[in-house]
Image: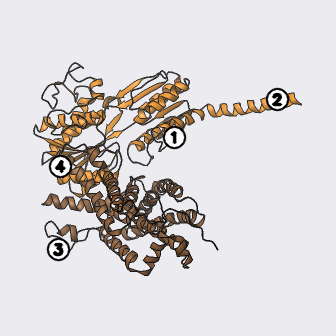
């Protein structure tokens, strides 16, 4: 029983950065912008988040630093890809390379330093319930926030007028523009929301997961977040399932190795990606070829004035 | 007019070369790193070696380093760039630079190259590495003494001979203390991913391991072990800061003495292509202080270290029994020879796991 609880706890922790980053990218992409720079924004968020927490001694301020840093990074993307209508794929990739460099520079001053990681909730009695106690009432703040975030995004996208307008920009920016909506401004906000989420997801790593900063510590999680958005076919509900599935496979393959299950570890490491491909195939078959992506995703929009 | 222009050009060239000559009085030494110098592990230790070199011979040499150089075609370009910048001795510090280094070495026979952890050489290309398995043996002794559950947790990077020989050396040592000791092995399939290394450490501890050892590069596993009140060994560098109550010891890559020796040879004109595979006796690596253990365990570790250094104790002393229960051929007299260790692709008896790819 204890092992099951330990596994669930590890899965939640491993899934949280993926869920936060992917939620941000989902909103960005629903507005019609493809920002491939998630990895770069995450690693800058990790560096700044650690710097903030180390300087102030507060995890909360560290998280804020991470969010602001991610949002600023995404603002560079917005200036290039929206303001100057540069190719979004190229800009996003450049943003990742830039982010890796900047984070190394910022992090150089904090090498080998350590902080006290984010505290876990503890409610007497409730947290002590076997199996589910620590899972439900013993997490750190990031985990609860990630759940609130995805619920909030779902509510925003499907239950508010602003969400409807944002989705309209993503599906047909010409029509949205014709109706008088400021497409580029809306997209800029969506991009910055995505950047802030990526920054927070990055900050989660040094603030709660492994409380130190090392260049490159995001180790590809930004790319997994991008894959997750595709996996979810741009829907918040499926995104939650996908994020926890990815986290579960990551953790379970480690346990399987410890138990000595005779499946090659390389194959198990590749499972989440195979699952993504499988889901894509199934979705496209189920929809008889129709794409589920926002129709204007990744296309440049220059308003005629 | 034309003549005077030529003379002027020649004069300028001469002046230029004179200027270059005064700068070239200092030997230029280049380093190629696979990671950032701030990785607190592999590359960090190589850079400490370079800093030791500068401290010792700084008035005679000038060093340059390139960090974060990916293995592959980029490496070749980077090494060649160092050659063109006038470096006469170039250290390439990752296994994956092997073929790139050889290619550039063949192209520039007057420049000397040193490749870490590889096996391909050239008249102007040496190789160097360390017998880390000696340190793993000492760790195995400590781990078996300190483990209450009798289960060790081992985080591997990739199932290559260097890592496999480390696991075997650990277990051979541990079995001399506790014949029934168990080891759980998790392959991270990466050298560096702090999150994944932390997950692997959690999984090992959740499955009953109480001493964590790693062949991956970040201090993440050490921190997890500390959080859970378990013990761990560092990797490559001093990690006590990340586990003041956790780290038992750590194998420290100390490249400084080797770099100084090789650069002195280059300065004296006695540099030769060599294959250096040094152990504790030649200071290619060192053990971090033995901490968080009782005095008798500490003494045992120090004695073992002294015996290995003196050549009285060999971690792969025959007979070595494989997983199939059959003794392994003993090519080195009373121990396995270097070739068998460098190409090790089997687990010893007592490891209840299957070596990937076997």
The residue under the point 29% across, 48% down is: A269
Which mark lies nearer to you, 1 or 2? Answer: 2
Q: Which residue is mark 4?
A: B209
User: Gap between marks 3 and 2, in whole Å?
Assistant: 91 Å
Q: Element type at marker 1? A: strand
Q: Element type at marker 2? A: helix
Confirm or deny contact between disc 1 and disc 2 (CB under 8 A): no
Which mark lies nearer to you, 3 or 1? Answer: 3
Residue B6: mark: 2
Q: Which residue is mark 3?
A: A126
The answer to whether A38 is drawn above or below residue B315 in the figure is: below
**Quarter placement of the C terminus of chain B:** top left
Please report, as a chain letter, where disc 4 is located.
B
Report whether residue B127 is seen.
Answer: yes
Q: Element type at marker 3? A: loop
Q: Colour of chain B?
A: orange
Left or right: A1 as drawn, with respect to B343: left
Please report, as a chain letter, where disc 2 is located.
B
Confirm or deny contact between disc 3 and disc 1 (CB under 8 A): no
Please report, as a chain letter, where disc 1 is located.
B
Q: Which residue is mark 1?
A: B65
User: Gap between marks 1 and 4, in whole Å?
Assistant: 40 Å
Closest to the observer: A210 or B254?
Answer: A210
Q: Element type at marker 4? A: loop
Q: Is disc 3 in the same subunit as disc 4?
A: no
| Location of residue A299 in the rendering, given as x and y in whole percent from the top left corner | 53, 63
Closest to the observer: A273 or A214?
Answer: A273
Identify by letter the chain in brown. A
Report whether residue B302 is seen.
Answer: no
Q: Residues within 10 Å of mark 2 (few under 14, many from 20)?
A: few
Left or right: A29 as drawn, with respect to B184: right
């Amino acid at each position: 029983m204890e092992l099951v609880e330990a596994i669930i706890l590890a899965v939640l922790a491993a899934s949280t950065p993926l869920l936060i980053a992917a939620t941000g990218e989902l909103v960005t992409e629903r507005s019609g912008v493809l920002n491939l720079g998630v990895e770069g924004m995450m690693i800058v968020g990790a560096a700044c988040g650690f710097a903030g927490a180390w300087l102030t001694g507060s995890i909360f301020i560290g998280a804020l630093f991470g969010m602001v840093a991610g949002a600023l990074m995404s603002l560079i993307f917005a200036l290039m890809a929206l303001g100057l209508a540069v190719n979004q794929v190229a800009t996003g990739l450049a943003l990742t390379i830039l982010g890796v460099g900047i984070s190394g520079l910022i992090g150089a001053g904090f090498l080998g330093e350590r902080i006290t990681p984010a505290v876990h909730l503890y409610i007497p009695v409730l947290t002590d319930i076997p199996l589910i106690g620590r899972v439900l009432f013993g997490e750190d703040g990031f985990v609860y926030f990630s759940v609130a975030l995805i619920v909030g995004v779902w509510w925003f996208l499907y239950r508010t007028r602003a969400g409807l307008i944002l989705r309209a920009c993503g599906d047909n920016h010409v029509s949205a523009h014709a109706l008088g909506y400021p497409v580029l401004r809306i997209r800029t906000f969506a991009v910055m929301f995505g950047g802030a989420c990526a920054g927070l997801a990055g900050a989660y790593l040094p603030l709660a997961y492994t409380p130190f900063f090392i260049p490159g510590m995001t180790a590809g999680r930004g790319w997994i977040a991008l894959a997750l958005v595709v996996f979810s076919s741009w829907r918040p509900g499926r995104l939650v399932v996908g994020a926890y599935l990815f986290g579960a496979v990551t953790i379970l393959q480690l346990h399987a190795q410890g138990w000595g299950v005779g499946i090659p570890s390389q194959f198990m490491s590749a499972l989440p990606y195979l699952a993504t491909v499988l889901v894509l195939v199934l979705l496209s078959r189920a929809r008889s070829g129709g794409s589920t992506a926002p129709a204007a995703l990744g296309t440049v929009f220059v308003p005629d004035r | 007019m034309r003549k005077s222009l030529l003379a002027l050009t020649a004069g300028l060239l001469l002046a230029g070369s004179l200027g270059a000559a005064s700068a070239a009085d200092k030997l230029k030494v280049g380093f190629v790193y696979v990671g950032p110098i701030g990785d607190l592990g592999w590359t960090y230790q190589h850079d400490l070696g370079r800093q030791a070199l500068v401290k010792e011979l700084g008035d005679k040499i000038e060093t340059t380093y390139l960090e974060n150089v990916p293995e592959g075609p980029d490496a070749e370009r980077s090494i060649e760039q160092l050659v063109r910048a006038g470096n006469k001795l170039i250290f390439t510090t990752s296994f994956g630079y092997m073929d790139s280094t050889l290619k550039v070495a063949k192209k520039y026979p007057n420049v000397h190259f040193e490749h870490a952890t590889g096996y391909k050489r050239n008249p102007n290309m040496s190789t160097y590495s360390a017998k880390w398995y000696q340190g793993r043996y000492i760790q195995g002794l400590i781990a078996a003494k300190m483990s209450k559950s009798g289960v060790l947790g081992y985080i591997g990077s990739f199932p290559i001979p260097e890592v496999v020989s480390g696991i075997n050396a650990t277990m051979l040592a541990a079995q001399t203390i506790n014949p029934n000791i168990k080891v759980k092995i998790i392959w991270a399939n990466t050298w560096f991913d702090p999150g994944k290394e932390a997950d692997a450490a959690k999984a090992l501890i959740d499955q009953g391991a109480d001493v964590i050892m790693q062949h991956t590069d970040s201090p993440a596993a050490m921190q997890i072990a500390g959080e859970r009140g378990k013990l761990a060994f560092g990797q490559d560098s001093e990690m006590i800061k990340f586990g003041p109550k956790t780290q038992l010891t750590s194998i420290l890559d100390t490249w400084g003495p080797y770099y100084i020796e090789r650069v002195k040879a280059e300065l004296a004109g006695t540099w030769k292509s060599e294959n250096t595979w040094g152990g504790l006796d030649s200071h290619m690596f060192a053990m971090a202080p033995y901490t968080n253990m009782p005095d008798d365990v500490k003494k045992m570790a120090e004695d073992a270290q002294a015996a290995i250094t003196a050549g009285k104790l060999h971690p792969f002393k025959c007979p070595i029994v494989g997983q199939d229960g059959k003794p392994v051929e003993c090519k080195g007299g009373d121990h396995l020879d270097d070739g068998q260790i460098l190409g090790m692709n089997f687990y010893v008896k007592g490891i209840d796991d299957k070596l990937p790819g076997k």
